[in-house]
Structure formats: structure tokens, C-alpha cells
Image: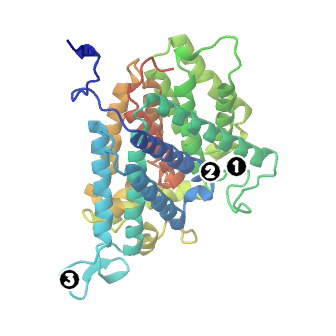
Amino acid sequence: MQQFPSLPPARSLPVISTRGPAVSPPAATSRRHWQRALAVGTVGAVLLLSPLPRASNQPQAMMLWSALIALAAALIAGRRPPPRLTPPAGWLLSLGGGLAVMALFQALPLPGWRGGLPVQTPAGELVLASLSFAPGASLIAALRIAGYLIFFLIVLGLAASRRRARALGNFAFWLVAAQAAWACTALLLLGDIAPHGEKTAYAGMATGSFVNRNSLASYLGMGLVLGVALHLRPARRRRGRWRPEVLALAVILLALLLTQSRMGIAASLAAAGVVLLRAGLSRARLLRLAVVPPVAGLALWSAGLLERLAEAGLSDTARPALYRQVLGMIGDRPLTGFGFDSFPLVYQMYHAPPVPAGVSWENAHSSYLTLWVEGGLVAGSLPLLAGLIAGRALWRRAGRAAPGQSMALAGLGALTLAGLHASVDFSFEIPANAFLLLTLVGLGLGAGPTERGQDP
């Protein structure tokens, strides 16, 4: 009888399961790697370079950033599905999208209005072809907002890995520390120089690569709360070891005091206090961290700041009158607004005594008022609503000793700082500050437990 070779047992044969996770082919894995690398490179490049050319506070710089961010997002997307968004992040993107749509709508020609729309203003009757008094500027604003939204979406995608989120947070912290070191060096050792040319304002005050001391103070304040969140939690105490991040925090605090920005310093210290309180520190350590470093810094470098607190500058005496005129502007167009980015043009029609005539007022010195003037009370309130939604989510997450708590604390502190300082200044209308704020809030909201282990 012919013998046939015996077959191996059935369980040893290769079986293709349709229920288990599919194994990605090498090409797909390689594509995901370079997409992730491009996303990290995009966020890192924006954080690194946006503060350098005068904090990117020119339309050309912001349009360039928007174009590069959109191009990177298109390359990142490819066939990869969009990141899964938590409800707070989805709401924030929806509100931001509504703001961009409103800015675009203001810039578009009005249909059905032959000869334009007559509008009464303090300068007389004007005939508008669009809702915006400056349609070109409003169109640029729509593109800028879209760039911010795409950047925020990229950050959320990266923050799905809390390890990557923490790495980006550390990268941002050391960038702020480098900016602080340069600001101190330029002021104290190099004769108060500026990289963009001779300083025409804020002599004797730290401005770094920024133009305005208040904008630099907001940037440094976000670095301060980020450093507190990342490095001063109880689990991070390493006795007997040299900690360079503590020196970096001291440099940031010194540069912050050297800006002599009254509200910038107050808002930054208040935001750092919120982070420390929410982190659940012991009372003794909370008192030591919240009181000793600021008091020591103020004692050493408070001369210029105390002089500024004692004096009343031009903007201080004129600001109440400016606010009254801005409120009148809001009352004239409460629903449609004058058009995003139109304030410098429109305010010229309302500029009157007692606001000094020899000074050019390009900002309302309150981001809230600017939003309501330019976007109306409904659309202009969308960023405030987004901030409240994000703040509520970050507050909840920052109070839980769970993976991602550090970045949630950093996002909460940055949002607190922005909410306080924006009430009397325009620092977060500066692109470099807006990018850093979006990064910290996005990392705080998106950092999830996708890897095993505790928050390092």
C-alpha cells in the first residue's frame, strides 16, 4: 500500500483572521511615520520661528504661516483618517470655524444691493459694497483664523500620544527660556538692542525679539505656567540632583519682571497660582513656590516696575475715554460689526477728544472690545465661548491625578493668563502668542492615555 506523508495538525496551519487587527503593510507604516514627522516638524517650526520676525505681527508673515500650515496639513492628511476628537475639541473647532465664516462673509460683496449699502458714520454717510469697512483686511483675517484652526487640529492629532504631547511641551518651554535669556542679555549686557533694528519705544525694558513689552510678557508668562506645570509637581521632586529647568524658570521670571508690564506680570503670577492650586500641592510647598520666588524677584528687580506703578502714562489717562468711544462703536453696529481687522481704519472716524489726537490708536487695548467692534456681539463672542468651554474641560482634567495632567495644568494656566491679560491689552492678537496658546490648550485637551504607564 502506498504511504502518503502525514499532514501537519490543522492548528499549525497559517490562518488569516478577519476579526483581529489588520497588520499594516510596510508602505503604510512608512507613510504614517513621515506624516507624523511632518506634523511634529510643522508645529516645532511654527513655535521656533514665529516669535523671530517681530512675532509675525505683519499680514505677510501670517499669510505665509497660514499657507505653510495648510500645505503641511494637506500632506499629512493623505489617506490617513482625521484624528478622533473629544467633544470639547470638536466644539472649539466649530466655534472657530464660525468665526472664520463670519470674517469671510463680511468681506464678500453684498448681493442685491445696487450701488452699495449706505451707512451713517460720524464722518458722514458712506456707501459700502460689503459688510466690512475694510473687506481686504477681513479676508486676510478669515485666512489667518483658518490657519489657526488647522494648526490647532494638527496639535490635537499629535497630542493623542501623551508622550509626544509632553515632548512638545518641553520643547515649547525651552524655546520660551531661550527667548527670556535673549531678552535679558539684550537689555542688560548688549545695551538694550533689538534684532529688528533700533528700538523706538520701550527703552530700558525687555522686549526680546518682540516689539511690545506687553506681548513679550504674555509669551514669557505662558512659559512660566508651562514650566510650573511640567517641573514643579510633587512627583517630580528629585532631591540632590541638579535641575536645569529651575534655572530656566528663574530666567523666565527675571525677564518677565524686566518687561515692566504691569498687567502682564500680574496675570502671569495669577495664572501660575492657579496651576499650583489645581496641582494639589501641600500648603507648605504651595506657599514656598507661590510666594518666595516672586517676592525675591520683585525685591531684586522692582525699581523700574515700581516707577511704572507710580506713574500714569498717556495710555492710562486716555484709556477710559478710549473705552467709552469703543463702546459707542459697538452700539452703532452691534450685530454685523465693522469687519475683522478693520479697527485701525474705522476708529479714525470716532477718534475725538479727550483721546489725544497726536497718537495713532491701532488697537482697542482690549481684545474683547476689539472682537465686538469688528465681529459684532454674536460672532465676536465666539472666542470667549470657546475659551469657557476649553477652560471647563481643562479644569476638570487638571484636577485628576491621571496621565496627561501636566499638560492639562499648562493649558489651564495659559488660558487663565490669556483671559486676564486680553481684558486690557491685545497681546494675544499677536500671532506668536496665539500659536503658543493654541499649542498648550491643544496639548492639554488632546493628551490621552495611548501609552501604558503613568505620566512621567
Measured in 3D between alpha carbons, the distance from the residue under mark 1 to the one under mark 2, in whole angstroms, is 7 Å
Which residue is more in the foreground, 202 or 437?
Answer: 437
Q: Is residue 259 left or right of residue 16?
A: right
Which residue is more in the foreground, 149 or 319?
Answer: 149
Which residue is more in the foreground, 96 or 66?
Answer: 66
Q: Tell me the crowding category of disc 1: few under 14, some 14 to 19, or many 20 or more residues within 10 angstroms, Cα based.
A: many
Which residue is identified by label 1? 205
Quadrant where the N terminus is found in the figure: top left
The amino acid beneath tag 3 is Trp
Question: Is the Cβ of the residue at disc 2 closer than 8 Å to that at disc 3?
Answer: no
Q: Locate residue 442, reporting x and y percent.
A: 41, 39
Which residue is more in the foreground, 277 or 54?
Answer: 54
Q: Which mark is residue 245?
A: none
Which residue is identified by label 2? 213
The amino acid beneath tag 1 is Met
Q: Which residue sits at x=51%, y=55%?
A: 430
Q: Locate residue 251, reporting x and y percent.
A: 69, 34
The amino acid beneath tag 2 is Arg
The residue lying furthest to the front in this view is 1
| Disc 1 secondary structure class | loop
Q: Is residue 326 left or right of residue 308?
A: left
Which residue is identified by label 3? 113
Residue 427 at least partly seen: yes
Measured in 3D between alpha carbons, the distance from the residue under mark 1 to the one under mark 3, in whole angstroms, is 52 Å
Q: Reading the chain from its start, which is encountered first: label 1 or label 3? A: 3
Question: Is the Cβ of the residue at disc 1 closer than 8 Å to that at disc 2?
Answer: yes
Q: Reading the chain from its start, which is encountered first: label 2 or label 3? A: 3
Q: Reading the chain from its start, which is encountered first: label 1 or label 2? A: 1
Judge whether 118 appears above or below 365 on screen: below
Q: Which residue sits at x=47%, y=26%?
A: 406
Q: Tell me the crowding category of disc 3: few under 14, some 14 to 19, or many 20 or more residues within 10 angstroms, Cα based.
A: few
Residue 321 at least partly seen: no
